[in-house]
Amino acid sequence: MIQVSEAAFEKIVEILSSANARNSFLRVGVDEGGCSGLSYSLIVDEQKTEGDILLNKGEFSILVHTNSIKYIEGLQIDYEESGMLGGFTLNNPNARASCGCGASFRMANYRGEVKKCD
């Protein structure tokens, strides 16, 4: 369902292993908004809720709410560092268009609610 590169795996373990994030999950989701209509959400979460699917990745687990599955099936998460910058990159085979920063996308059959990016 969701693939995680080695670089992203190491960064996620580092984040979740921090003192403030023990016993936490990486929550991956999709929200309405962004310049293309749908925006990705990657957050550290400590609570599993009804409707969540738990994906065990060995040293950590990913939570995905069932409402987001149709948008991110096959998502590939990577982590790239470039000079002083670094961040997660998301390659979504379901996206038919995306914004320049890669944080927002739309699908062939659903555009979402387009909003100005922050």
Image (cartoon, rainbow, N blue to C red):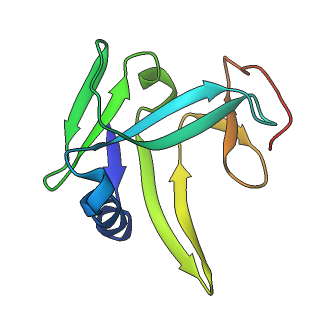
Question: Is 3 positioned to the left or the right of 82 in the image?
Answer: left
Q: Determine which quarter of the picture holds residue 51.
A: top left
The residue under the point 81% across, 26% down is: 114
Question: Is 65 positioned to the left or the right of 118 in the image?
Answer: left
The number of discs equals 0
Of residues 12 and 95, the one drawn nearer to the viewer in this rendering: 12
Residue 35, horizontal then vertical, whole percent: 82, 37
Quadrant of the frame with the N terminus: top left
The residue under the point 65% across, 35% down is: 39
Residue 100, horizontal then vertical, whole percent: 79, 54
The residue under the point 43% across, 37% down is: 28
> Is 109 rendered above or below residue 87?
above
Q: Determine which quarter of the picture holds residue 27.
A: top left
Furthest residue toward front = 20
Residue 4, horizontal then vertical, whole percent: 34, 55
Q: Determine which quarter of the picture holds residue 109.
A: top right
Furthest residue toward top = 50
Quadrant of the frame with the C terminus: top right
> Is 19 rendered above or below residue 80?
above
Furthest residue toward left = 58
Of residues 33 and 110, the one drawn nearer to the viewer in this rendering: 33
Of residues 105 and 60, the one drawn nearer to the viewer in this rendering: 60
Furthest residue toward bottom = 83
The residue under the point 48% across, 32% down is: 29
Residue 112, horizontal then vertical, whole percent: 72, 20
Question: Is 111 positioned to the left or the right of 62 in the image?
Answer: right
> Is 86 rendered above or below residue 93?
below
> Is 108 rendered above or below residue 75?
above
